[in-house]
């Protein structure tokens, strides 16, 4: 799967990225901070692309180093999530979150 990059440059939540629910659940996450910024990666099992988006419940990423972070971080999710977003909670810097899901469809 091609990498997806989510970006923030102020206190805001990024648009959501969705995983391929036919693919493997393994997802690599890399957050790179420029300047000063505090951020959290958030995940959901709800479909963030299906309206109303306000009905999506976001949870802190199960990778503790990607919650309330202010430095570059790398982690891997082993459990399936449908949506991932980047939430910058403080600072005027910027954060780029690169997401890569293991490629290939699962067999039945």
Image (cartoon, rainbow, N blue to C red):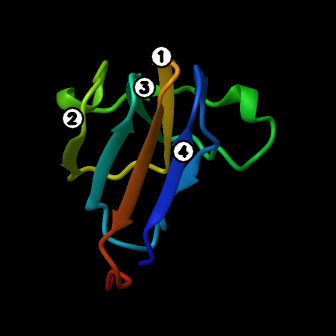
Q: Tell me if residue 74 comes above or below residue 108 in the rendering.
A: above
In this rendering, the label closer to the viewer, 1 or 2: 1
Q: Nearer the viewer, mark 4 or mark 2?
A: 4
Circle 1 packing at 10 Å, graded few (<14), some (14-19), many (20+), is some
Q: Which residue is the site of mark 2? A: 63
- Which tag, 4 or 2, sits closer to the chain's start? 4
* Residue 84, placed above or below residue 99: above
Residue at image mark 3: 59
| Residue hosting label 1 | 91
In the displayed orientation, state which residue is furthest to the top.
90
Residue 48 point in image, percent of width and height: 64, 43
Element assignment for label 1: loop
What residue appears at the point 48 percent right and 67 percent down from the top-left corner? Answer: 20
Near-viewer residue (5 or 59): 5
First in sequence: mark 1 vs mark 2: 2
Circle 4 — which element? strand
Residue located beneath label 4 in the image = 7
Measure the alpha-carbon separation of dots 4 and 2: 19 Å
Q: Nearer the viewer, residue 19 or 98?
A: 98
Tell me if label 1 and label 2 are in contact, CB under 8 Å.
Answer: no
- For the point 59% across and 45% down, the residue is 16
How much space separates mark 1 and mark 2, taking CA atoms?
22 Å
The span from disc 2 to disc 3 (Cα, nearest Å) is 11 Å
Residue ID at (70%, 27%): 55
Residue depicted at x 74% and y 27%: 54
Q: Is residue 93 left or right of residue 55?
A: left
Q: Earlier in the sequence, mark 3 or mark 4?
A: 4
Q: Nearer the viewer, residue 58 or 11?
A: 11
């Amino acid at each position: 799967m091609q990498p997806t990059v989510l970006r923030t440059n102020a206190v805001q939540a990024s648009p959501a990225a969705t995983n391929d629910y036919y693919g493997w659940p393994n997802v690599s996450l890399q957050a790179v901070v420029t300047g000063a910024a505090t951020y959290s990666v958030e995940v959901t099992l709800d479909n963030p692309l299906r309206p109303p988006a306000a009905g999506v419940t976001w949870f802190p990423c199960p990778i503790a180093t990607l919650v309330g972070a202010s430095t570059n971080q790398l982690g891997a999710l082993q459990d399936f999530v449908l949506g991932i977003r980047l939430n910058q909670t403080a600072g005027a810097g910027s954060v780029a979150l690169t997401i890569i899901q293991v490629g290939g469809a699962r067999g039945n």
